[in-house]
Amino acid sequence: MSKTFRFTDQEEEALNNVSLSVNKALVQAGKKPLRDSEIFHEIIKQTLLDGSIAVTEEGTLKVEAKK
């Protein structure tokens, strides 16, 4: 499997919006901001590595993040 990942325009915009929001909160809390890739890795960790992914009876994916 490739180690690169291509975002759609919509996904890239969503990640940028999340990044701005997360980093604003981090800075207000006196923490250092995160790079987009660090945020994406945390999303992957909480879903693929620590969460669960299943196929519903309708054939769609159901993703549950770590709680």
Image (cartoon, rainbow, N blue to C red):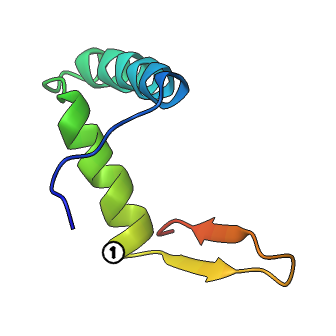
Estimate the x, y position of residue 63 in percent, counting from the top left: 60, 67
Please give the name of the residue rendered at 21% of the width and 68% of the height, measured from the top-left corner. 1
Please give the name of the residue rendered at 52% of the width and 79% of the height, measured from the top-left corner. 52
Residue situated in front as seen by the camera: 41 or 61: 61
Query: Which residue reaches farthest right?
Result: 58
Hey, which quadrant is residue 34 in on the image? top left
Estimate the x, y position of residue 40 in percent, counting from the top left: 30, 44
Instruction: Please name the residue that numbered disc 1 is placed on.
Output: 49
Estimate the x, y position of residue 50 in percent, counting from the top left: 38, 76
In this view, 54 is above or below 66: below
In this view, 18 is above or below 58: above
Residue situated in front as seen by the camera: 10 or 39: 10
Hey, which quadrant is residue 7 in on the image? top left
The answer to whether 22 appears left or right of 39 in the picture is right
In this view, 52 is above or below 30: below
Please give the name of the residue rendered at 74% of the width and 69% of the height, measured from the top-left corner. 60
Q: Amino acid at mark 1?
A: Leu
The answer to whether 29 appears left or right of 60 in the picture is left
Estimate the x, y position of residue 31 in percent, counting from the top left: 17, 27
Residue situated in front as seen by the camera: 19 or 10: 10
